Image (cartoon, helix red, strand yellow):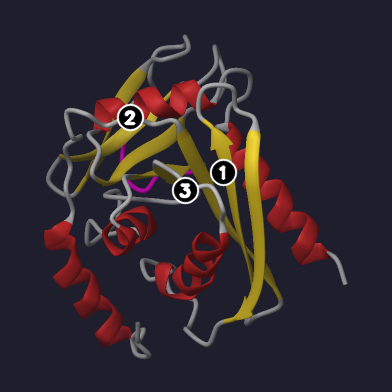
Amino acid sequence: MEWPRTVDDAVAMQERLRTQVITTSAPDLRVDTVAGLDVGYRGDDAVVGVCVVFDANTLAVLDEVVVEDKTDFPYIAGLFAFREMPVLLRTLDQVKVAPDLLVADGQGLAHPRRFGLACHLGVHTGIPSIGVAKNPMGRFDQPGPSRGSTSDLLMDADDVVGKALRTQDGVKPVFVSVGHKIDLDRACAEVLRLAPRYRLPETTRRADTLTRQVASSG
């Protein structure tokens, strides 16, 4: 597809596509394979895209793809998807194990226009998707101290755009938001399943490690 080259065109695309986001789970949604997606940077315009596919039940790695590319879209808050989507879609084209769920290292509905990277990936591919961010975009109260505790992530006039989720006892929460074709409670449940030992889900941990290794090499 042809990607926008100006800020105005990118915003217009987000406004148009956000109406296609589905915030409910299909009754028969089954997640046996899950992909973690991340992008690293090597300089201003060189990007490294990573897709790691896991068995959702055992967390065994089933496939990994790394793609290096260049981007000429400017670095603008709220429009990161236009720097990162093209290389991530190339990684998804190359994986040999189809994921049932995409986990993006970033935002879904927790976005000024309710259309972050996870939403864009989900709408473009048709695959259920979740955004899991290390830092909040919005306001929240601290969830309870135990694993599985949540609190609402709010933006604007108290719109609930996600959850602050405590994945381990006493650690800082992560911030989960719907991307596409999944509801928020199910999204949080999937993130907990993917984070049996550490704060970050294994999808994010492995993808982040790979992007750092490749981006820092050479």
Lower sequence index among marks 2 and 3: 2
Q: Mark 2 and mark 1 in contact (Cβ < 8 Å)?
A: no
Front position in the image: 151 or 24: 24
Q: Residue at x 40, y 12 (%)?
A: 144
Q: Is label 1 in a helix, a strand or a loop?
A: strand
Instruction: Give the total of numbered labels.
Output: 3
Q: Name the spot of residue 19 as percent of width and height, x first.
A: 11, 61
Against 160, residue 147 (above or below) is above
Q: Position of residue 216 (x, y in %)?
A: 81, 64
Foreground pick, 171 / 18? 18
Near mark 3 (Cα within 10 A), the count class, few <14, some 14-19 or many ≥20, is some
Asked if the magenta segment contains residue 138, the reply would be yes
**Depth-wise, is mark 1 or mark 3 nearer the camera?**
3
Do the CB atoms of the residues marked 2 and 3 lie less than 8 Å apart?
A: no
Q: Nearer the viewer, residue 191 or 113?
A: 191
Q: Residue at x 45, y 51 (%)?
A: 106
- In the picture, the disc for residue 121 is none
Vertical placement of residue 75 versus 177, above or below:
below
Q: Can residue 90 be seen in this view?
A: yes
Residue 186 located left or right of residue 85: left
Circle 3 residue: 98
Residue 140 in view here: no
Picture quarter with the C terminus: bottom right
Give, as a single range, the part of the protein colored magenta: 135-140
Q: What element carries label 3?
A: loop
For the residue labelled by badge 2, is the local secondary structure a helix, a strand or a loop?
loop
- Give the amino acid type for the residue marked by disc 3 in the picture: Ala
Amino acid at circle 1: Val
Q: Who's the residue at 17% across and 42% down the image? A: 23
Please name the residue that numbered disc 2 is placed on.
30
Residue highlighted by disc 1: 53
Q: Residue at x 55, y 14 (%)?
A: 170
